[in-house]
Image (cartoon, rainbow, N blue to C red):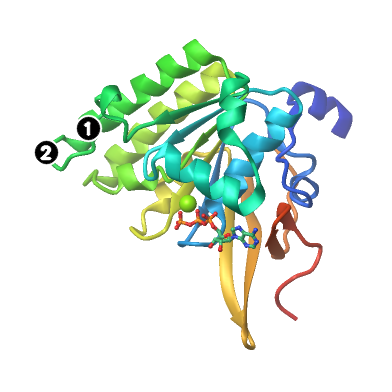
Amino acid sequence: MAQDSTRAFPRVRSGVPGFDEMVDGGFHKGTVNTITGSSGTGKTVFASQFIYSGTLVGEKGMIITPSESSAVLKREMASSFGWDFSDLERKGLLHIVDVTDPVIRLQKSIDVDPTDFLINFRKLIERKLQDEKPARLFIDDLMAFFSAVESPFKSRSLADDLFGVIRNSGITATITIGTAFGMNHILEYGADSATILNRDRIGNVMIRSLYIMKMRGSRIANTIRILDISDDGMSVSTLSPYP
Ligand SMILES: Nc1ncnc2c1ncn2[C@@H]1O[C@H](COP(=O)(O)OP(=O)(O)OP(=O)(O)O)[C@@H](O)[C@H]1O
Ligand SMILES: [Mg+2]
């Protein structure tokens, strides 16, 4: 039975050791998967590792960086883990779309209506996915854009439109979501899976952790697990942060 469902709905490995076991084998292919957490919990590292690990098996990745410029992201991943994103771009295994790039003309300005901005953003993604045909997509901190939309109903329908474009393309996406604006639930509702990253003080130590909030059509682990970040990247431990 499980094997039949895997064939009907193939899995894409996350590239984060320990994670796939929690979701019965990985993300479903062609789905939108959110990674939520407050600042510094590891969202960008998780999603970058998803992209990087794909390139190691020849799967082309695309990264859309609305909040950080691509140069900053490349520098962080090189200094943290030695991942050379510029080299992957040269080899055609990675395409980074820098929304802060003025030539894209997707001006992030308070003068631009946030709804118009998100509609243009969706069109940009649709075009880029058609042109580049990546297997994996990562959009960094989408909440930055949605926080300016005043109505939750409108946000939800804009998110559904954007997620629909991604699903129709057959690409597997991870989307990171910051919690600063408290509107993360709107995007999590629309996603196929939602993973939550946390950071807690246990005694004198700050410990990162992770749990799966949902994955449609899949069995999931119901435990909170410790998340490690080292020079080798991120991994999920079998241990829980709490007694
Ligand atoms: N080689 C390493 N070993 C241990 N920790 C590291 C290493 N490289 C980076 N880190 C840590 O990983 C943390 C997680 O960073 P990340 O950028 O993924 O968080 P984030 O959730 O995206 O934060 P933000 O909301 O600010 O974008 C950083 O604070 C950094 O200290
Ligand atoms: Mg980040």
Q: Residue at x 69, y 29 (%)?
A: 55
Q: Residue furthest left?
A: 111
Quadrant location, the N terminus: top right
Residue at image location 42% in from the left, 52% down from the top: 184
**What is the three-letter code of the residue carrying label 1?**
Gln
Q: Which residue is mark 2?
A: 111
Residue 77 lies, in percent from the top left, at: 57, 46
Residue contact at pointers 2 and 1, CB within 8 angstroms: yes
Q: Residue furthest top?
A: 131
Please tell me how many numbered marks the rendered image carries: 2
What residue does disc 1 label? 107
Q: Which mark is residue 24?
A: none
On the image, the x and y values in percent for residue 47 come to 58, 43
Q: Residue at x 72, y 47 (%)?
A: 16
Residue placed at 76% from the left, 45% from the top? Answer: 20
Instruction: Indicate the quadrant of ligand 1 in the picture.
Output: bottom right
User: Does the residue tagged 1 have its C-beta within 8 Å of any atom of ligand 1?
Assistant: no
Disc 2 residue type? Answer: Asp
Rendered position, 34 above or below 12 = below
Q: Nearer the viewer, residue 202 or 151?
A: 202
- In the picture as drawn, the residue positioned furthest to the bottom comes out as 203
Is residue 2 placed above or below 95 in the rendered structure? below
Label 1 crowding class (10 Å Cα cut-off): few <14, some 14-19, many 20+?
some
Question: In the picture, residue 50 is in which quadrant?
Answer: top right
